[in-house]
Image (spheres, rainbow, N blue to C red):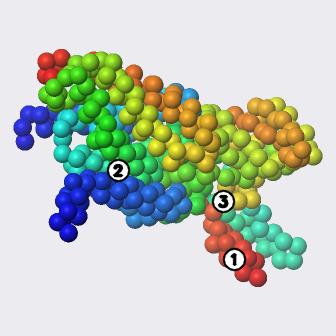
Amino acid sequence: MNRLLEILKKYDYVVVFVVLVVLSFVLMARTSYYQSSRIVAWGNGIAGDWYRGVNSVGGYFGLKAENDRLAAENAALRAQLAQSYISYTDSVFVVNDTVYKQRYSYTEAQVMKNSWTQQNNYIMINKGSDHGVEPDMAVISPQGIVGIVVSTSRNFATVMPVLHSDSRNSVKVRRTGVSGSLVWDGLNYQYAQIVDITTAYQINEGDTIVTSGQANDFPEGIPVGYVQSAEPNQGTGFYKVSLRLATEFNKLDHVYIIDNRFREEQQQLMKGVEGQ
Amino acid sequence: MNSQTWRIVGRFALLMALQLLVLNYVYLGGYVMPMLYVLFILMLPTGMNRIPLLLIAFGTGLLMDVMSNALGFHALACTVVAMLRIWFADRILTRGEPVTITTPSVYSVTPQYFISYLLLMLAAYYLVFFTAELFGFRGFGGVLLATICSTLVTTILCVLYQLVFLKRKEEQ
């Protein structure tokens, strides 16, 4: 018994090491991106305060460029106000007053922490559950698609951008309407890839890729990027598409969180289908 | 708290600030992720008690994890580095000399020993970190390439850091 205690005493640091390694694995397993665990929410609070301080200093440097971008966006928005509405007519009942019903509402937010050099990047924004932000809401920039809200604390939310290994978004070629899913290979923050896009329709260099509106609460037609190269993947019937992202992820400042007002209705409907 | 403790606390603050305010925003291609903050663990005094060393390394990694929103990755890599330090490092660092070094640095250790110490420890750090983060994503070749590139860049950064911020006399 004494010998056992002696050995334990001699190798107590190995026990500590093993405990810490196990703890690391537990943390890794528990905090994958989709689980907004308590610890991450708590971390959001702390990291959020820190990055708010950093941002209040850094924010001044890009003011002019940011103003130009916002002005350009205002002009673009004026031109396409009707896009946030969907048609609410059907062939049986047509009530004049409710021809359109608002489907998407936009909340402005500012990026406080942004990364684009990692494998799994994330963005932190300065709006949280107090402002009505919920997980799964879509986030766009004036230039195009950004990502999905994955967790929220009271004043902050974290967004999984396209630049994340788990990111999947439904997109389509604007010219032909053929859809595929957007992924990122982790190599360059300016380029992303599309998989599962059929070779039945030709894709040209420079084709515009937009969101398809089929998943993840992105409205249809948000710019995603422009085709850089498209090669048929031998024997699969699918293209291997590389595209230049419309959003400059290294310069994000103002973003918009999109609230899909029909989300619950859509989800319940889907639940009904899946339950059968 | 004596002056050495304060120096360690100051170094921690400086390295963390450099990491979080500057290096995390530097883009050097998809295979290089400079992690200068690991130098803090590598510069803890030799002959330090083992359990505090492990706990400090784990805590440092955990702080990086919280700041990058994916828990466990940095903590695991830092803990492994601390353990390797306990097993091998003090032997490399004090080779051929009596054990009088306090802070491992380019000044206190023969430069080639110190650089091989950095290379070894950082390679271990990145191998663990990248295996945990991107093995399923880029495969073994990708992990290896990223480990080699990142290790080389971070080693250079570590040496530069010491040449800039460390006074020759002070850390003997």
Q: CA distance from mark 3 to mark 2?
A: 33 Å
Q: Which mark is residue A81?
A: none
Residue A160 location (% of width, % of height): 55, 51
Q: CA distance from mark 2 to mark 1?
A: 38 Å
The quadrant the N terminus of chain A occupies is bottom left
Q: Which mark is residue A217?
A: 3
Asked if badges 2 and 1 are on one and the same chain, I answer no
Which residue is under mark 2? B62
- In what element is the residue under mark 2? helix
Q: Say if residue A89 shows up in the picture.
A: yes
Q: Amino acid at mark 1?
A: Lys
Q: Which mark is residue A271?
A: 1
Task: Identify the residue shown where x is 22% and y is 19%.
Answer: B107
Q: Amino acid at mark 3?
A: Asp
Q: Is residue A131 left or right of residue B64?
A: right
Q: Amino acid at mark 2?
A: Leu
Up the image or down, A155 lies above or below B53; here it is below
Asked if badges 3 and 2 are on one and the same chain, I answer no
Q: CA distance from mark 1 to mark 3?
A: 16 Å
Q: Say if residue A53 shows up in the picture.
A: no
Residue A259 location (% of width, % of height): 59, 61
Q: Residue furthest left?
A: B2
Q: Between disc 1 and disc 3, whose residue precedes?
A: 3
Q: Which of labels 3 and 2 is toward the front?
A: 2
Up the image or down, B158 lies above or below A25; here it is above
Q: Which of labels 1 and 3 is toward the front?
A: 1
Task: Identify the residue shown where x is 67% and y is 72%.
Answer: A267
Q: Is disc 2 surrounded by few (<14), some (14 to 19) or many (20+) residues within 10 Å?
A: many
Q: Which of labels 2 and 1 is toward the front?
A: 2
